[in-house]
Structures are given as C-alpha cells and as structure tokens.
Image: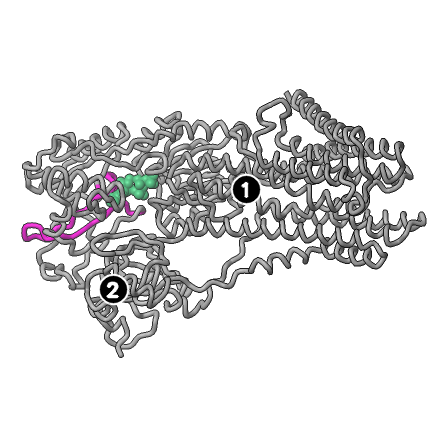
Amino acid sequence: MKEFYQLSATEVKRELNGYEEPLTSDDVEKHKEKYGANELAEEKKKGTLAVFLEQFKDFLVVILIFSAIVSGFLGDGESAAVILVVITINAVLGTVQTKKAEQSLAGLKKLSGPEAKVLRGEAVVLLPTREITVGDIVLLEAGDYVPADGRIIENASLKIDESALTGESVGVDKTSDVIEEEVPLGDRKNMVFSGSFVTYGRGSFVVTGIGMGTEVGKIAGLLKTTSEKKTPLQVSLDQFGQKLSIIILVFCGILFGISVFRGQDIGNAFLFAVALAVAAIPEALSSIVTIVLSFGTQKMAKEHAIIRKLQAVEGLGSVSVICSDKTGTLTQNKMTVEDYYVEGRRIRAAAIDVEDRAQNQLLTYSILCNDSTNVDGVELGDPTETALINLGSTLHREAKEIREKYPRLSEIPFDSDRKLMSTLHKLDGKYIMVVKGAVDVLLGRMTAIQKQGAVCAVTEEEIEKIVAQNEAFSQEGLRVLAFAYKEMPQAADKAYEPGQKDGRLALEDEKELTFLGLIAMMDPPREESKAAVEECIRAGIKPIMITGDHKVTASAIARRIGILKDDSEACEGADIESLTDEELKDFVEGISVYARVSPEHKIRIVRAWQEKGNIVSMTGDGVNDAPALKQADIGVAMGITGTEVSKDAAAMVLTDDNFATIIKAVENGRNVYRNIKNAIQFLLSGNFGAILTVLYASIAGLPVPFAPVHLLFINLLTDSLPAIALGVEPHTSRVMEEKPRPVNESILTRDFLIKIGTEGLVIACTTTAGFLIGYRQGGGALGSTFAFGTLCLSRLVHGFNCKSERPVVFTKRFFNNLYLIGAFVIGFALITAVLTVPALNGIFKVVTLRMPQMMTVYGLAVMNLLVIQVLKWFRRFNRR
Ligand code: ATP
C-alpha cells in the first residue's frame, strides 16, 4: 500500500474522509471517537494518597513519629496520640495545599495551551490543538507550531524547523508535490510533522496522524510532565532553612544534654528537645512560597497576564526596564485607512474614487497582496491588512470576489526583517507582481513610477516628494505602507501557471519596481497606555518602545503616551548596527524609542541593559522574536496576535496584548513578593519568640515553660493558617511607589532580620511575663499554661502586625483581609477551648484557667500587638 506522501493531497483527503471538502461536523465527531484526542499521553500524576504519604517523609515528621513512639513506651499514651493526631492534621493541610497549587498551575497551562487554525465547514476557526482530528485541514503560517502530522495541500514557501524530531535546526523547504519513490522520514518533503514549527511561509495540510499516532508520539511515547523548577526565592529559602535547621538541632541537642545532666528524665528531655526543634525550624517556608505564588498567578490570570514560568512572578518585582512593541501593545491595533497618496495627490479615504484608474488599481492591489479575511464581520489576520480589505470591501467589491477573479499564483510572504510582501497575479493578461511594505525599503528597490497609467523612469524630485509625503503622514502618527508592482517577463509566461515549479517568485525579483502609491493608516494609542507609562516611570521602571515601524510615526505615538520626551531619545535599528556591545551599553541609556528594528536588534538591546545590571522585560509576537523573549528576564508574548512559537518562548502571555497589563503584572509581582516576605516575617519572628522564652527559662534555672504538645499545637495548627492568610493579603498600589527591588538582594536582608529579631523579642517578653505570672500564682503547671496561652495568642495577634510595614491598628486596613481574620478566629477559638474546657486540659497538659487568668493572657497578647505597632510607628518616624 502507498504511504500518504506517495499520494496527492486530494487522494489523501479522499482516502481519509471520502470527499475533498473540509470535514463536516458529523464526521468530526466520528473521527474524534475513532482516533481520540490529539494529545500525547502524559506521565501519570501523583495521586492524592501519594501526596499525603509524602508529607510524612519530612525529616522532622519522622522524628516526631519516633518521639510519639518513645512517649508511648514511656507510658504517656495521651501525648503519643496527640502528636500523631497533630501530625495527621498537618499532613492533611499539606496535601490540600499541594493539590490546590498543582491544580491552579495545571489550569494556567490550559489557559495558555497551543491553538491552531482549522478549516471547518466554510470557515477558518481557531481551535485548541487537542480538538484537531484526522482528516482536518489545518492552515499554517510563520510562527505556528505544526499541531499534527499531515500531507501538505498548499505550499507557499513553507520552511519548517523539524529540530524537535531530527535535531537539525535548519529550516526544511516543503513541497506539495507527490513523491513517487519510497523515502525515509527526513525526505518526505510534502509532509509536516507534529512538534515542528513554521519559520517562514504559509500553507495548509490535511491531518494524517494525531496524538500518539504521530511520528513524535511514536518516538517520545509519553509526554514527560516536567516538574516546575524551584524559583530563586524558593531555593534561597530552602538553603536558609537548612542552615537554620542545623543550628537549631545543635542547640536542641545541647539543651537535651543540659537537661539530662541536671538529672531530668531522659525520655521527657528528648521529647522536649524534639518539640522545640519542631517549633523553631521554619519547615513551612518553601511551601508557603509555592502556595502564595500559585494564588498570585491565579489573580494575574484574571487580570489578563498568564504566567508560564513561576519564576516570572518573583522576577516581575525586580523589573527595571520594560521594552514594548508599539503596534497593538501600546496602540489599539484597530487600524483604519485614513489617507491615500497616488499619482502625486493626497486623497482622504472617504473621498476615494473607484472610477479613477490609479485609485482603483491601488485598492485592488491592497486586497490582492494581503492575507487577511473578513467573513461576515469576523476578522482574521494582521490588522494592518484587515484595514486594507475593510476599505476595499466598502468602497469597491468584496475581497473574496476580487481574489477569485485574480488568484494568487505565487508569493513571497511578509517577514519583519525584509519588511516586504509580494504576490503574483494574472491581471489583464499580464503577470504582475504586487509588492507592499515599508516605504524606505520599497524606495530603495524602485526604478520607475506610474504616471497617468504609464510606467516612467523615476526622478530625484519624485522620490523627494514621496519621502516628504511619508514624513508628513508619519508626523501625524500614521502608519504608512508603500505599494509597487512589476510586470514579470513574458518569457516566463507559462511557467507561472499553478503547478509550475520554476515559476515561483524569488527574493531577487523584488527589485526594479514601479511605484504606485502610499496608504496611511491610523492606529490610535490605547486609552490606558498613557497612565500605564506614567505609573511605570513612577515605579522606577524605564519604558522603552521597540518597533518595526517608521521612526517618525513611532516618535509621534511615543510622545503622545509619554515615553518620548525629547527627539534625541529616538533612534533606528540601523544606528546600533555599527556599535560594539560595549558602546551599545552606553548608548541604550539615552534611548526610549527604537524604530525600524529587526529581531536581532532586540536581543542586543536586552543584553546591553542586562549587562548594566537590569532585569529586563521584553514583548514580542513574531516567530523571530523567540530568541529575544528567551534572552529577556521576563519574555512577554501577545496572546491575541502572537505566534505560537513566541508564546512558547515567553515567561508570561498577555491575553489582551495590552502594555497596561504588564504594569499591572509588575504590581502583582511586587505585592506577591511583599506578601511572601510578610508571611516569612510572621513565621520566623514567632519561632524566635518561642526559642528565646525557653532559653531564658533555662538560663534562669526555671522549669521548662512549654510541654512538647504546646509547641506542636502552635507550630503545626494555629500558625500555618495566618501565614497563608498573610500570603493572600489584598494587594495595594502603594508598592508602585517604591523603586524596583535590586536583583541580587536576598530576601533576608540585615534590616529584615533585625525586624524579625526585635519582634521575636517582644513576643518572648510577653510570653515570659505570662509564664512568670502563672508560675508565681500556682507553680510550674500554671506557669506553663500561661506561657502556652500567651505565646499562641501573641502569635495569632502578631499576624496583624505582619500585614504591613506601617502601623495598621485604627485603620481600615486592619480588617481588610478576611482570611487573616478567619485564621485568627479559628486559632482564638481553639486555644480558648483548650484553656477553659476541663475535658481538653489533660490532653494538652494545661490547667483550667479562670476568667481573670484568661483576661491576663488576652491582655498580654494584645500588649504584644500594641508594642510592635508603636515600634513600627517609631521606625517610620525615624525614616522620615
Ligand atoms: P511593532 O514592532 O511595534 O509590532 P510593526 O508591526 O510596525 O510594529 P513589523 O510587523 O515588524 O512591526 O513591521 C515592520 C514594517 O513592515 C512596518 O512598519 C510596515 O512598514 C511593514 N509591514 C508591516 N506589516 C506588513 C505587511 N503585512 N505587509 C507588508 N509590509 C508590512
């Protein structure tokens, strides 16, 4: 039997579907049932039970289980049971959090999942690639991932990077012709393979294999779900946690030795040392970061920024330079044609006369040399081109009609390096190549001009007139395209008919052109751009516009939205070509607008800023932008107009293509970082308070202030909820008043550690006071009850201290985090029950407190709140 590549595309369609048209909706369903979804089987995810069991692998938990067993042997069954219950509850909490974080990340992946353009019925629809089935007709253009294996139907200079399959990254030229003989995979030039991507050109193919049936499915077998790499913050906290754990373990070991030396019971001394270690070691640090990051990404997704790499959330807080595209990101990308310039006259779009030969010709050419469509109001394609067909359709005839009358015989697709696009048509018996593109590029390739229908040699004067007109349009912020054409030599007559290979347009043909006219389009800035730029500057971030458009147009728009203050801050891509990397580093400092930039320039600009110690965010949409997006610290792709390849390379995808969304994301990033910092401050200062209290008692020769179960109760139950609640503290825009966080600044700065130290000291003071009051009133047991109650409540109250650097009591802010209030209420209810319900007393090794005693404990906890708030006030006052 013949393979698909040995059949014509029509035969393939017939064999798979029984007919040549796109799949009917009935057959789509049938095929989906028969072939399944277009996806590679994933490695099995860990089940809930496995995640739950993993919680017990933690070193500390193992020690705790061991100590529960020791307690049991020592005849203290109650303690053993409590420890086990607490560990189990803690593991359940851990499992729920891990699963939630996993789900939210999986949700994000789905949101930014790949899509493809598929012909279903009459229309082209954008579908998630998993929906594609065998027999479907898929359209391809530069920047698309090939979503399935298939036989090429239409091939317009398609070049495909098949490195995912072959390791060879040079683009492969494709064909739509039948290959008769049997050839290996790499030579099946009329086939495309899933996982490769289009680097150039346009085309379509009929799907022959999906999911596990594709070549890549056969090789790869399973899609390895790459586990999320830890973010720099997680890594540094892990390292810090490890060091701290060792110190604490040594400390607890010494304490254990002293207790035994003093003649205490070995079993109890051991249990205590373990409990203190658990209370002091901040084992939750890394997981809090994961949870807060995943909550942060959910919020960002709702605000149109989808995070693809978790590191980006942290990085966003340090961004100090944002390089943004103009078209569509800073502007609305809703283009409308404003003016025409043809045969030496400027004509308003509304005044175009279709009866005029030259105007009619320009209108027709703008529809022919154009890939966009507008079917019943549904626009598909580049807005620059859609603007052209919209005008053509209203004034003249439907684009479809014109395109059917003069079909495209060959083409050289647009690319942003060349800044040109050419198509070949048979018009009035002649083969005409229509070229459109950037005015400066086209001027360099024209030798003639059309006047009163005749082709004449172009004069210097005429060129100057065109340049002046282009300047005038650009000054008004209009985007200008030039149109030219060339009659292709008659000798090649037959060769240009469809199917004639040698009749293809080649790059060398784009010269000796005849100038026809200019079309100027308006693309107004987005309304929110100006405010976003202002906010960006206020936040200490430099906004930079990088565009392929003309310098004057770019400057006009940049000035309007506040990026450009002085004309000397604008330059062209060509200006940086002659600079060495060293010179470029000085040069970039004074530039806010780069015009006529090609993708390679983008990489150099990013690198220059990075070498100056900046964290750079860069937007991009084209296939050639992928390297710059990867080079940037935060590569940002456009969700609407971006190519699949650019989205894949980016750390963040904007679902609304809007510059303002990047600024919002920076604000979110800064807030997330601040919340993580607050949660860490909460955990570490509380732990430190507990250690200091124990240390004091041990130095003062007093009994140990806590029973092991107290520390476990606080650390594993009443402490984790406020920490998470602090992580989801409502965001404020005040973070945008600060400068970007220095890149290599560790989260644990000296200032931060001092704050943790002082607040820990305050907690230790109130707890020790409670301990001493209780000890004086009724000895060790009452003292320990007081200490436990005060520490537990002080830490709950301390959650409110950690909300902000500023004092928050007596402000609305105090109540704005319902989760924190909820965490407080739960903790408060638990500890009050433990201290006052006699049935619970035995289990938690406390004595029942009477009302006045309870009041003392509450009072001490509140004191802790007040003292730290006053300290905050002082600190602020001092700083001012
Ligand atoms: P930005 O980089 O801000 O998105 P841009 O859309 O102008 O701006 P490119 O898409 O790289 O950047 O386009 C570069 C230039 O190529 C444009 O200024 C225009 O002159 C020309 N151009 C853009 N689109 C087309 C097209 N479809 N056909 C022909 N020429 C085009």
Residue 430 among magenta residues: yes
| Location of mark 1 (residue) | 314
Specify start and end residues of the magenta stretch as a single range.
417-442
Mark positioned earlier in the residue sequence (1 or 2) = 2
Q: Where, by quadrant of the figure, is residue 713 drawn?
A: top right
Cβ–Cβ under 8 Å for marks 1 and 2: no
How far from the left and from the top, in percent, is residue 767? 79, 34
Which residue type carries mark 1? Answer: Glu
Q: For ligand 1, which image quadrant applies?
A: top left
**Local secondary structure at mark 2:** loop
Mark yes or no: residue 88 visible: yes
Q: Quick one: quadrant of the C terminus? A: top right
* Quarter of image, res 267: bottom right
Q: Is residue 742 visible?
A: no
- Please tell me whether residue 333 is drawn above or below residue 810 in the rendered image: below
Question: In front here: 734 or 192?
Answer: 734
Horizontal relation, residue 409 to residue 45: left or right: left
Q: Quadrant of the N terminus?
A: bottom left
Q: Is residue 327 above or below residue 213?
A: above
Query: Circle 2 is placed at which residue position?
Result: 175
| In this picture, residue 768 sits left or right of residue 680 | right
Residue 292 in the figure: left or right of residue 495: right
Query: Would you say 645 lies left or right of 232 here?
Result: left
In the rendered image, the residue lying farthest to the bottom is: 1
Residue 616, label in figure: none
User: Of residues 859 and 436, which is closer to you in this image?
Assistant: 859
User: Which of the two residues, 759 or 537, is positioned nearer the viewer here?
Assistant: 759
Q: Residue at x 12, y 30 (%)?
A: 351
Cα separation between marks 1 and 2: 46 Å
Residue 416 x/y as whole percent: 31, 46
